[in-house]
């Protein structure tokens, strides 16, 4: 579907893009995985956006010079990369790849990228999008010679995970460059049941949060793309989405029966993603968030912390999780090579577990149990939470219930907006 650029009002364009998304989500036949025996979760067979695009013979890309924004998570069920698959298929005119943070093939650590190079496997030019936006990124899209930009990256459901802001920046820059944008869906690995946590205030907008969404947004990337286009982009991009079939909002990642590829070096398992939207807040403190261990974001600690923290956390009455006194020596990042004390999270009931509330409770109890607790000097915690309230309330001695109550009005408003863009029920 090609929309006539310049011929639609903002409202008309939004209606057209939403209609396109709804068309892509027509009920699946048994052969597509929408029903019938076998498959996952009660006979459902999940099909990703890419699987549906390929099954349709790439009709959506017919006659277009295509560029793909992706990383190592852009794989098929048999773990082939979609770039390799499309490059080998004469039905697709694939001419460029665009890599986010960590890079297209995933060779860079946090805060890094791969730069501009030619991919050895395909010979395709790979362009770096990391920390590029606006006209600078639009110029890259123009120079690449693409007509349509396809986005396919596995998200983890947290506002401060940067791939969704790569999505936002690429949509904005694609519009500036006059390019069509197609988003292929993948599961939210921690379900799409609801939105939780503080909503970003615009004065704290950074690459770990461009726009006012909840800390745990509970959306898929196609739903986020529609939200971005409808609420936040000054000029909506020509957008099309290819939804999944066979996915329910209550599904955790294992229901998909898809292989897990770490979306970033410190996101090794779906269990990491489950805790990440809460425990990533420890990046804003002088405690280790577990980087440099085999259980990042599940192990938290610092020099001088002992069993008192785990005891206080277990006494906090948090549902679905228990805490173990733990000692570990990170191989890089904070406390590299030093043995430190802290806690390990053990989620025993993921249905009941609230990662954001848990993260707040751990901050509250860490500050009370360890006299050495401190926020990072740059107040990074305010960028992660999107507000000063979490930091200032905890400093003033507020408990978990008080801190969580402080964001409920903002969260209710976001939930009302979010509801308009949900297309899995």
Image: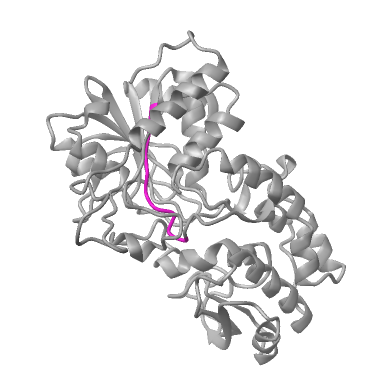
The magenta stretch spans residue 103: no
Taking 158 as reference, is 36 left or right? left
Residue 148 visible in the snapshot: yes
Which residues, given as a range, are shown in magenta? 181-190
Residue visible at 69% across and 50% down? Answer: 411
Q: Is residue 336 above or below residue 230?
A: below
In depth, the one of 332 and 57 nearer the eye is 57
The magenta stretch spans residue 182: yes
Residue visible at 27% across and 27% down? Answer: 60
Quadrant location of the N terminus in the rendered image: top left
Q: Is residue 125 above or below residue 13?
A: below
Q: Which of the 4 quarters of the picture holds residue 257?
A: bottom left
Check the image and name the residue furthest to the front: 36
Check the image and name the residue furthest to the right: 396
Residue 193, given in percent of the width and then of the height, sits at 52, 57
Q: Which of the 4 quarters of the picture holds residue 54?
A: top left
Q: Is residue 113 above or below residue 266?
A: above
Residue visible at 63% across and 47% down? Answer: 415
In depth, the one of 410 and 172 nearer the eye is 410
Taking 113 as reference, is 35 left or right? left
Residue 7, given in percent of the width and then of the height, sits at 48, 8
Check the image and name the residue furthest to the bottom: 307
Residue 106, given in percent of the width and then of the height, sits at 35, 53
């Amino acid at each position: 579907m090609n929309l006539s650029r310049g011929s639609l009002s903002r409202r008309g364009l939004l209606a057209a893009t939403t209609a396109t998304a709804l068309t892509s989500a027509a009920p699946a036949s048994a052969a597509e995985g929408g029903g019938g025996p076998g498959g996952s979760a009660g006979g459902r067979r999940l099909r990703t956006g890419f699987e549906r695009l390929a099954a349709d013979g790439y009709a959506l890309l017919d006659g277009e010079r295509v560029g793909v924004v992706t990383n190592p998570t852009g794989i098929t069920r048999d773990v082939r990369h979609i770039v390799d698959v499309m490059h080998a298929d004469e039905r697709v005119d694939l001419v460029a790849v665009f890599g986010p943070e960590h890079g297209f093939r995933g060779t860079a650590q946090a805060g890094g990228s791969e730069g501009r190079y030619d991919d050895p496997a395909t010979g395709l030019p790979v362009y770096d999008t990391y920390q590029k936006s606006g006209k600078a990124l639009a110029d890259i899209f123009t120079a690449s010679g693409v007509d349509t930009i396809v986005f396919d990256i596995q998200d983890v459901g947290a506002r401060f995970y940067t791939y969704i802001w790569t999505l936002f920046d690429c949509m904005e820059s694609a519009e500036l460059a006059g390019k069509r944008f197609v988003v292929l869906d993948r599961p939210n690995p921690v379900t799409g049941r609801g939105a939780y946590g503080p909503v970003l205030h615009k004065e704290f907008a950074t690459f770990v949060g461009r726009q006012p969404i909840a800390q745990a947004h509970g959306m898929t990337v196609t739903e986020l793309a529609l939200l971005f286009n409808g609420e936040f982009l000054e000029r909506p991009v020509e957008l099309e989405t290819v939804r999944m079939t066979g996915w329910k909002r209550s599904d955790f990642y294992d229901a998909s029966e898809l292989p897990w590829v770490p979306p970033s070096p410190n996101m090794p398992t779906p269990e990491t993603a489950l805790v990440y939207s809460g425990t990533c807040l420890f990046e804003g403190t002088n405690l280790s968030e577990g980087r440099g261990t085999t259980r990042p974001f599940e192990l938290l600690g610092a020099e001088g912390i002992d069993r008192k923290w785990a005891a206080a956390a277990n006494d906090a009455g948090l549902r679905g999780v228990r805490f173990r006194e733990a000692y570990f020596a990170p191989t890089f990042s904070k406390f590299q090579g030093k043995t430190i004390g802290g806690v390990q999270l053990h989620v025993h009931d993921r249905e009941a577990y609230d990662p954001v509330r848990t993260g707040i409770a751990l901050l509250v109890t860490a500050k009370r149990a360890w006299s050495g607790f401190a926020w990072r000097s740059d107040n990074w915690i305010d960028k992660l939470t999107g507000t000063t309230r979490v930091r200032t309330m905890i400093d003033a001695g507020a408990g978990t219930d008080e801190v969580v109550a402080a964001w409920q009005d903002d969260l209710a408003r976001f939930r009302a907006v979010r509801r308009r863009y949900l297309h899995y029920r």
